[in-house]
């Protein structure tokens, strides 16, 4: 059955993930700020009628939450893929609170940078029992001493979503 998947920050390194999920027949809504990047993403969609884009800034908490609630009203979401920088963590928490109140079952796939491998730097939002939480930590390619490419990041998050491990590491991390 096709799902509605919301991807916050899905117009950059997670663009390929958005397009892959759309190609599989899922309805995908991508939220980011830059409208021309969002339009370019839409133009590349294999199933454009199932790819929605929404311009919103997660550092403007109230407006962002209103926008998320508007999206949920159009169609409930089964998964939220969240790529937030630190300045958006308070909004991410608020979003979890609001979605948790509105929906009975949803999954949060929280994408994080390498620092999250250190427990003291790992932000885990609190969620209620409506939410199944998964964190995906982006590491590096140790053998080649380099960061992950966008393709490896999108592919890694896609694989994580298929496996349902509570913590999934793409590449390697130093703890
Ligand atoms: N291994 C690691 O630990 C690791 C971790 C992270 C990143 N990286 C690398 O670092 C590079 C840069 O990272 P990046 O964060 O710039 O990745 P990115 O995914 O290329 O860009 C961030 C995404 O979030 C959106 N975004 C940013 N600020 C936002 C806001 N305030 N409100 C709503 N949406 C917002 C961006 O779109 P808009 O700008 O249009 O809003 C975009 O879709 C990546 O290309 C990746 O290769 C490595």
Image (cartoon, grey):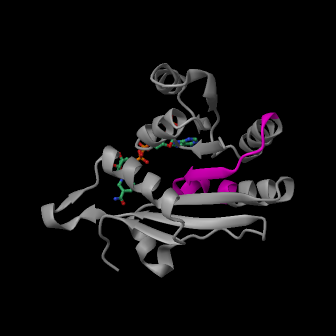
| Residue lying farthest to the left in this orientation | 144
Going by the image, does 151 lie left or right of 3? left
Residue 53 in the image, given as x and y percentages of width and height: 61, 29
Q: Dividing the image into four quarters, tell me where ligand 1 lies.
A: top left
Above or below, 60 relative to 91:
above
**Magenta residue check for 78:** yes
Residue at left offset 56%, top offset 70%: 123
Quarter location, residue 174:
bottom left
Going by the image, does 48 lie left or right of 132? left
Residue 1 in the image, given as x and y percentages of width and height: 66, 44
Above or below, 41 relative to 65:
above
Residue 137 in the image, given as x and y percentages of width and height: 43, 65
Residue at left offset 54%, top offset 72%: 166
17 and 113: which one is in front?
17
Residue 21 in the image, given as x and y percentages of width and height: 52, 40
Task: Quadrant for the C terminus, please.
Answer: bottom left
- Please state the extent of the stretch shown in magenta in the rendering: 74-92
| Residue lying farthest to the front in this orientation | 1
136 and 104: which one is in front?
104
Residue at left offset 51%, top offset 73%: 122
Above or below, 11 relative to 99:
above
Residue at left offset 63%, top offset 44%: 5
Quarter location, residue 114:
bottom left
33 and 107: which one is in front?
107
């Amino acid at each position: 059955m096709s799902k509605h998947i919301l991807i916050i920050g899905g117009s950059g390194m997670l663009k390929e993930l958005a397009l892959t999920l759309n190609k599989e027949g899922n309805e995908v809504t991508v939220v980011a700020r830059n409208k021309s990047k969002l339009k370019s993403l839409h133009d590349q969609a294999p199933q454009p009628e199932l790819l929605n884009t929404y311009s919103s800034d997660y550092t403007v908490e109230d407006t962002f939450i209103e926008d998320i609630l508007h999206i949920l009203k159009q169609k409930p979401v089964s998964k939220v893929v969240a790529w937030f920088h630190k300045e958006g963590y308070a909004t991410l928490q608020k979003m979890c609170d609001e979605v948790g109140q509105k929906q009975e079952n949803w999954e949060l796939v929280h994408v994080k940078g390498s620092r999250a491998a250190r427990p003291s730097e790992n932000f885990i939002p609190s969620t209620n029992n409506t939410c199944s939480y998964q964190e995906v930590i982006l590491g590096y390619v140790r053998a080649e001493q380099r960061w992950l490419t966008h393709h490896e990041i999108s592919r890694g998050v896609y694989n994580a979503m298929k496996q349902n491990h509570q913590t999934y590491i793409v590449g390697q991390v130093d703890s």
